[in-house]
Amino acid sequence: MTQRNEHTRMTSAEGSISSALVVGSGLIGTSVALALVRRGVVVHLTDRDPVAVRRAADLGAGTPDPPPSQVDLAVVAVSPSATATVVAGLLAGNVAATVVDTAGVKAGILREVAAVVGAAPHFVGTHPMAGRERSGPGAARADLFEGRPWVLTPGAADARSLSRAHLLVSLCGGLAVEMDATAHDAAVALVSHVPQVAASIVAARLAEGEDTALGLTGQGLRDVTRVAASDPDLWVDVLVANAEPVARILAELRQDVDAVVHALQDIVEDPDDPEWARTSLREVLLRGNAGRARLPGKHGGRSTAYAVVPVVVSDRPGELARLVNDVGAAGVNIEDLRIEHSPGQAVGLVELAVTPEAETQVTAALTALGWVVHAEKA
Amino acid sequence: MTQRNEHTRMTSAEGSISSALVVGSGLIGTSVALALVRRGVVVHLTDRDPVAVRRAADLGAGTPDPPPSQVDLAVVAVSPSATATVVAGLLAGNVAATVVDTAGVKAGILREVAAVVGAAPHFVGTHPMAGRERSGPGAARADLFEGRPWVLTPGAADARSLSRAHLLVSLCGGLAVEMDATAHDAAVALVSHVPQVAASIVAARLAEGEDTALGLTGQGLRDVTRVAASDPDLWVDVLVANAEPVARILAELRQDVDAVVHALQDIVEDPDDPEWARTSLREVLLRGNAGRARLPGKHGGRSTAYAVVPVVVSDRPGELARLVNDVGAAGVNIEDLRIEHSPGQAVGLVELAVTPEAETQVTAALTALGWVVHAEKA
């Protein structure tokens, strides 16, 4: 996953990108364009919406003028449902030496493109694993892909086009990961599409909830439902394009929901003998523990058990700065930071994540400076 | 929800808490004990595990000696399944003038207590809405309840005991909310128990996932599954105690899962005519948007649309401090802060949440100081 330097060397020798056409001036297209412009590439922008193109051009993402001749690379960043058609058109028109798309689902697009133009040696399917809840050119940023995995599904691509796709990833600061298209689609169904559907379905329960009930909301519910704020039209496209693996994993998920519902109904009907039901509930929760523990942590490694140092901070300007300053002065790096919300009260709790070795040091230093620190030590 | 001052006045006149017995030296019991000790209450600690009691006492949460005479208040903070028995025992033994419990589910406990001792004028069921993924006395903190809702379910309590329960909440810095026990249980099923089960079930999918797939994990999956790291034994107890409303809401949730699975299977079987399926998927996602939008924001108010200012920060000690400092120097208060993880790369993105009015100001100030800021403006 981190062979970026190697690829950069290889591709610099074999191909180059001095001109590009970016089709689609949304979040992804405009972010790619911004990154390429920053690296000296001449970028041409196009979108079916002239306002979006103008906005992207105003942000410095390139020119709305059409390219005068064949470009080195065309990047297709339109909705998943329109992607194959646009890619096939660009290939048929010989508009670019290499065409890549950026849609979040890959196998169907490879198949559709092949159905129109046959084997496509100049096409590489790609998927930058970056995004935001916000969309449109205004949300774009040149560093959107910085340090993020960017999947390449080579398909029938020739070496030159594949190398150019690697160069694109490298110019955008992404981390190239080559995968088979079908394996990619199953992977994103698991780590992205099914969690999105689950978050939406949990959040859907709240649409009709009582105000009093919602007043008891804590951080857990906020976290579980955060991605439920995403764009429904985009997500319908994604789910339709990846229907098979998402349906398969959701059907497995439904079996667990069934198991929990049955266990709970069993308890309601026979509250005096809950042992079978308890075992069944516990088994699901334990599998949840096991799955959660497998998530990779910061910097691509296995989840590191950072020590969490909770510090009481009053909700006044300057307090957070003073805290972060004091931690820095103690020579400790903050690995992560969470501000716990305190509904109705002007006191917050800041949880500093630090390496386990630094915990004692930072706790002592902050306590000496008068901070109220709650060490985890018992 | 915020009538704390009024209640404090009332209860100060009617009753007082100068001595307390805290049964259970876990996270909640020890945190209550720490808060009471800080306010001058003489606290006696007991737990079936002598090690836990000693640890809590060492942390300054009170004395392991039994009370010499009746205490003003007994706080029961044991597992939900043991709560009713302990409460009934304390009431029968006249150990305290008022007994409260702290279990996360209320109706069943009221019912069980009444079954043993009849109407219980000296008992108030309560539920402090605070917790952590960690447990045990070592994770306790005196400010755990600071600014958090703390539900009181009066049941058959007399005015004096109810007023003492209000005083307890006030001494711990919580925000008292009186609710009917059944309404409370339905509310926590919605905002806490069902989201917990859903997070565990999504995380359970990852237990068998490929390493390559998990390598594509983003912040969305991390957020959705965070609470899946919680203690299974505690949660089995909670789910068993609140089986009826959790089963009801989960059964509704299952209908949405069914609808999505059916829509996706329909697309797999007939990919050329996805219109009905698209409508069905979109409807679920839209309800998810609507539910998510109803969550209250920081300080108990409706979700405020903070402006998010993304700033590129290198992963070196002192950089975060420098940033937070510069924001403070610009006279802007940071409402929330998120460090986006950048797998495999030494550059991070810090998202500062500020009031919409402060956005332009902080962006200009940081840019002038050389920070790379990505304003949301289009």
Image: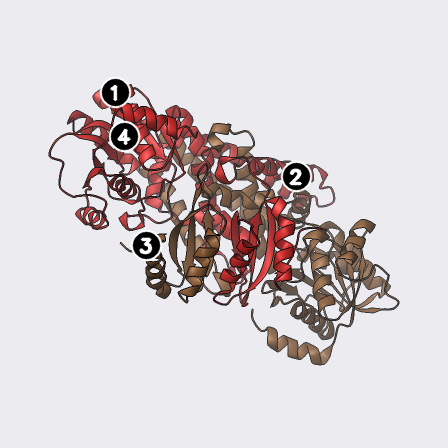
Chain colours: A red, B brown
Say which residue appears at 41% left-offset and 67% top-offset: B331
Question: Disc 1 vs disc 2: Cβ atoms closer than 8 Å?
Answer: no
- Tag 2 or tag 1, which sits nearer the N-term? 1
Question: Disc 3 vs disc 2: Cβ atoms closer than 8 Å?
Answer: no
Residue A225: x percent and y percent? 47, 49
Chain holding disc 2: A
Q: Looking at the picture, do discs 4 and 3 lie on one chain?
A: no
For the residues labelled 2 and 4, the Cα–Cα distance comes to: 46 Å
* Residue matched to label 2: A282
Q: In which quarter of the image is the N terminus of chain A?
A: top left
For the residues labelled 4 and 3, the Cα–Cα distance comes to: 27 Å
> Hey, which quadrant is residue B99 in on the image?
bottom right
Under mark 3, the amino acid is Glu
Does residue A265 appear in this view? yes
Q: In what element is the residue under mark 2?
A: helix
- In the drawing, what numbered circle is on residue B376? 3
**Is the residue A115 above or below the residue A340 in the image?**
above
- Tag 4 or tag 2, which sits nearer the N-term? 4
How crowded pointer 2 is (Cα within 10 Å; few <14, some 14-19, many 20+) is rated as: some
Q: In what element is the residue under mark 3?
A: loop
For the residues labelled 4 and 1, the Cα–Cα distance comes to: 11 Å
Under mark 2, the amino acid is Arg
